[in-house]
Image: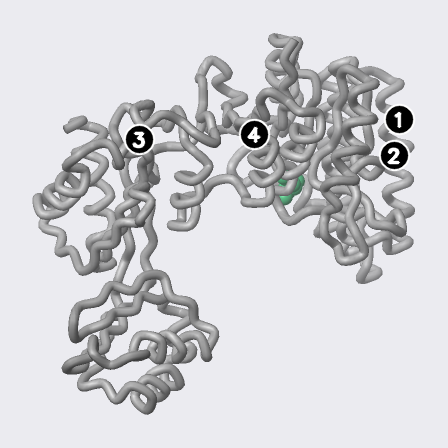
C-alpha cells in the first residue's frame, strides 16, 4: 500500500466543522497514514489565528501583565472544538491539565517559541483522539542543533523509527526541540516544513498539503478573476515564479521532499474533489495545456543605464560597474547590454538607499558619458517548461503586449528556456498580466 503524509493548514482546522472535513479526507484513503496539523486558523476573515493569540498572550505574561482573559479566549477555541466534536469528558479533563501546565510555563517564562508551539501541540492531541490515531510529540523527534538549524538526518531517522512502528500517527507541525530540550519553532507557516520532513523520513509516495485553495493559479486572481488552476508544475518552474513574487511554498518546505524525489500535492479541504496542483521534479513539456505554466511579476525596480562610447573595447568595464553595486551590497536582477550601453536592473529600495555611493563609484571607476535612471520599472515573468519545444512563444508574448499597448523596455530569456522576463512600466503591469493570460489561457492561441 502506498503511504501519504497529509498536512492540514490552520484554516482546515479552524473549528469542529473543519475537523470533520479533515477526518473525512483522512478516512477516505487508508494510505493517508501520517497527519501533520497546524494550529486552528481563522474561522472568518476578521478572526485571529490561535498562534497569534498565543504570542500575544505570552507577551503579556512575560511583561508581568494580567493575561487571564487572553488565556481564556485560547482555552475557549479548543473547548468549542472538542465539545462540537463530541469528544467527551475525558478529553476535556486532559485538555484542562494541558492548559494548567501551559499557564504555569507562561508564568515561568518558557519562551515565545514554546508558547506558539502549543497551538499545534493541542490540535495534534485533539485530532489524534478524534481519528483514533497515535499522538507523537514533535519535540521528541524533530531536532535543532545549538546553531538553531534543523538536524535533518538525525530528525529523519528519529521520525522514521517512531512512525514506522505505529502505522498511523498525528505529529504536530511547526516545532521541534533544542539540545537542552527547550522548544523551538520554525519560521511562521512552518508546519509545511514539518510535513515535508515527515514525508521524506517515511519515504512517502506523496506529500499532500491541504489548505483552502485548489492548488496554484496561473496568475494572481486579484488581476485576472478566476484564473485557471495549474495542474502540474515542476520545482524549477515553482522557483522561478516564487522568485518573481508568486505566493508559493517556502523553500525550506520543498528541500526535504525534493531531495527524496517525493511530489507535493496542494489540495483544498473545502473541495476535496478538486485534484489540486502536483509539484514534481520533472514533467514532459506537453503536460501543460497552454504552453505556459504561470505568470508572475513585481513592481519596484530601477534600471540604471550607463552609456560610454567604445565601452565594449574597454576590458573590465562591466566588472567595474558591477563592483560598484557589489561594494554597496546591492545585488542585480538583470543586465541587458548593447555595444555602448549597459543597463543594470536592481530593486528600487535597495538601490535608492545607496544611490549616491554607487553612482559616485561608477563615475570615478568607469568615467561614463551618461548615466540614465528609470525609476518606474516592473518585471513580468512568463514561466513554462513547454516553451522550449513550442516555437513562437516569445512572439505571442510580445504580440499580446503590443496589442495591449504596452511598451517593452527589456527582454530576458533565461538560458534554460523556462522563462521570459519582460521589463515594462509599473503602470502597465496589470494590463500585461491580463494580456499574456488572455492570449495563452483564454484564447489558447
Ligand atoms: N501556526 C503557525 C503559524 O501560524 C505555523 C503554521 O500554521 O504553519 O505560522
Please give the name of the residue rendered at 77% of the width and 56% of the height, measured from the top-left corner: 60
Mark toward the start of the polypeptide (1 vs 4): 1
Please give the name of the residue rendered at 25% of the width and 69% of the height, measured from the top-left corner: 343
Q: Position of 142 compared to 192: left or right?
A: right
In the picture, the disc for residue 227 is 3
Q: Please tell me in which quarter of the rendered image ligand 1 is found.
A: top right
Query: In which quadrant of the rendered image does the C terminus lie?
Result: top left
Please give the name of the residue rendered at 31% of the width and 31% of the height, measured from the top-left corner: 227
Q: What element carries label 2?
A: helix
Q: Quadrant of residue 96?
A: top right
Question: Against 62, is 185 above or below?
Answer: above
Question: Against 89, is 256 above or below?
Answer: below
Q: Position of 437 compared to 24: left or right?
A: left
Visible in this render: residue 86?
Answer: no
| Label 2 CA crowd tier, 10 Å (few <14, some 14–19, many 20+) | some
Question: Against 73, is 282 above or below?
Answer: above
Mark toward the start of the polypeptide (3 vs 1): 1
Label 3 to label 1: alpha-carbon separation: 46 Å
Query: In which quadrant of the rendered image does the N terminus lie?
Result: top right
- Discs 4/2, front: 4
Query: Residue under circle 2?
Result: 98
Q: Quadrant of residue 38?
A: top right
- Discs 2/3, front: 3
Query: Residue under circle 1?
Result: 94
Pinpoint residue 299: horizontal percent, then vertical percent.
32, 57
Mark toward the start of the polypeptide (4 vs 2): 2
Q: In which quarter of the image is residue 282?
A: top left
In the picture, the disc for residue 261 is 4
Pinpoint residue 261: horizontal percent, then vertical percent.
56, 29
- Discs 1/4, front: 4
Q: Is mark 3 on a helix, strand or loop?
A: loop
Q: For disc 4, does the CB lie below 8 Å from ligand 1? A: no
Amino acid at each position: 500500500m502506498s503511504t501519504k503524509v497529509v498536512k492540514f493548514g490552520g484554516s482546515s482546522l479552524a473549528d469542529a466543522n473543519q475537523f470533520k472535513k479533515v477526518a473525512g479526507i483522512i478516512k477516505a484513503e487508508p494510505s493517508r497514514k501520517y497527519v501533520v496539523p497546524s494550529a486552528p486558523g481563522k474561522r472568518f476573515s476578521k478572526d485571529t489565528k490561535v498562534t497569534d493569540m498565543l504570542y500575544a498572550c505570552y507577551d503579556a505574561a512575560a511583561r508581568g501583565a494580567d493575561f487571564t482573559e487572553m488565556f481564556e479566549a485560547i482555552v475557549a477555541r479548543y473547548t468549542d472544538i472538542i465539545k462540537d466534536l463530541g469528544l467527551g469528558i475525558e478529553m476535556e479533563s486532559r485538555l484542562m491539565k494541558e492548559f494548567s501546565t501551559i499557564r504555569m510555563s507562561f508564568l515561568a517564562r518558557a519562551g515565545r517559541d514554546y508558547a506558539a508551539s502549543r497551538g499545534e501541540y493541542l490540535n495534534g492531541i485533539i485530532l489524534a483522539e478524534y481519528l483514533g490515531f497515535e499522538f507523537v510529540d514533535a519535540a521528541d523527534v524533530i531536532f535543532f542543533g545549538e546553531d538553531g538549524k534543523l538536524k535533518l538526518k538525525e530528525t529523519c531517522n528519529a521520525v522514521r523509527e517512531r512512525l514506522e512502528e505505529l502505522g498511523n500517527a498525528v505529529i504536530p507541525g511547526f516545532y521541534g526541540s533544542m539540545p537542552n530540550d527547550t522548544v523551538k519553532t520554525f519560521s511562521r507557516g512552518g508546519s509545511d516544513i514539518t510535513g515535508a520532513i515527515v514525508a521524506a523520513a517515511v519515504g512517502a509516495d506523496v506529500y499532500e498539503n491541504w489548505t483552502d485553495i485548489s492548488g496554484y493559479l496561473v496568475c494572481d486572481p486579484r488581476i485576472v478573476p478566476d484564473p485557471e488552476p495549474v495542474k502540474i508544475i515542476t520545482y524549477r518552474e515553482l522557483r522561478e515564479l516564487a522568485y518573481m513574487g508568486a505566493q508559493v511554498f517556502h523553500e525550506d518546505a520543498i528541500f526535504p521532499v525534493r531531495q527524496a524525489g517525493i511530489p507535493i500535492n496542494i489540495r483544498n479541504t473545502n473541495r476535496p474533489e478538486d485534484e489540486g496542483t502536483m509539484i514534481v521534479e520533472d514533467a514532459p513539456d506537453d503536460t501543460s495545456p497552454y504552453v505556459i505554466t504561470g505568470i508572475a511579476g513585481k513592481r519596484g525596480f530601477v534600471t540604471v543605464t550607463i552609456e560610454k562610447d567604445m565601452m565594449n573595447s574597454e576590458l573590465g568595464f562591466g566588472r567595474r560597474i558591477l563592483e560598484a553595486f557589489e561594494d554597496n551590497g546591492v545585488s542585480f536582477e538583470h543586465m541587458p547590454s548593447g555595444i555602448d550601453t549597459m543597463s543594470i536592473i536592481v530593486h528600487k529600495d535597495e538601490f535608492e538607499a545607496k544611490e549616491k555611493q554607487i553612482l559616485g563609484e561608477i563615475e570615478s571607476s568607469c568615467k561614463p558619458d551618461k548615466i540614465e535612471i528609470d525609476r518606474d520599472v516592473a518585471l513580468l515573468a512568463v514561466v513554462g517548461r513547454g516553451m522550449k519545444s513550442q516555437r513562437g512563444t516569445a512572439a505571442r508574448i510580445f504580440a499580446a503586449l503590443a496589442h495591449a499597448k504596452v511598451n517593452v523596455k527589456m527582454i530576458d530569456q533565461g538560458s534554460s528556456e523556462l522563462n521570459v522576463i519582460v521589463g515594462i512600466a509599473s503602470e502597465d503591469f496589470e494590463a500585461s498580466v491580463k494580456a499574456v493570460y488572455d492570449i495563452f489561457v483564454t484564447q489558447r492561441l
